[in-house]
Amino acid sequence: MFYDNFKAACKRKGTNMTVVLSELGYSTSSTGSWKAGSFPRLDIAINIANHLEISLDELVYGINNAPSRTRKNEQVIDQEWFDIISRIPPERQQICKDFLRTHMIEK
């Protein structure tokens, strides 16, 4: 599961596992055991998630299975929103935030 989620996240980000592990200074020798179902150490998983700019939940559970985020007294945010937001290039995020703020209602 971790292996498949890692591979899918890399594909969405336009990279691959070998490149990510190399950029983080990790060996690629563990990918075979991950493919067989084992998980990396928590610190490695956190570093991979941070490097890919995704949540640890997404890396561990997958994009469609990650627990939904919710704030007190607010609606549950569905996975589609996370998928959309995660694909907005950094240089366009501010304009998107500003646009969405014009559609907010005060609670």
Image (tube, rainbow, N blue to C red):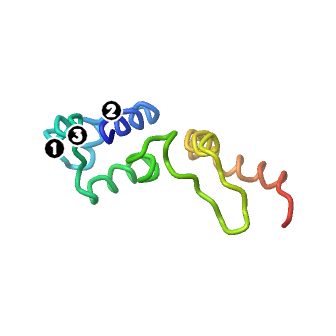
Q: How many numbered circles are shown? A: 3
Which residue is the site of mark 2? Answer: 16
Residue 60: percent from left, percent from top: 38, 47
Q: Is residue 3 above or below residue 99?
A: above
**Is the N terminus in the top left, top right, bottom left or bottom right quadrant?**
top left
Q: Is residue 46 above or below residue 4?
A: below
Find the distance from the CA under tag 3 to the CA under tag 1.
13 Å
Q: Is label 1 in a helix, a strand or a loop? A: loop
What amino acid type is highlighted by mark number 2? Asn
Few, some or many C-alpha atoms within 10 Å of disc 2 (few <14, some 14-19, many ≥20)?
Answer: some
Find the distance from the CA under tag 2 to the CA under tag 1.
14 Å
Q: Are marks 2 and 1 in contact (CB under 8 Å)?
A: no
Q: Are marks 3 and 1 in contact (CB under 8 Å)?
A: no
Mark 2 and mark 1 lie on one chain; the one further toward the N terminus is 2
Residue 4: percent from left, percent from top: 34, 34
Which residue is the site of mark 1? Answer: 27
Few, some or many C-alpha atoms within 10 Å of disc 1 (few <14, some 14-19, many ≥20)?
Answer: few
Q: Is label 2 in a helix, a strand or a loop? A: loop
Q: Which mark is residue 34?
A: 3
Residue 85: percent from left, percent from top: 61, 44
Residue occupying image coordinates x 30% and y 41%? 20
Residue furthest to the left: 29
Left or right: 42 with respect to 55?
left
What amino acid type is highlighted by mark number 1? Ser
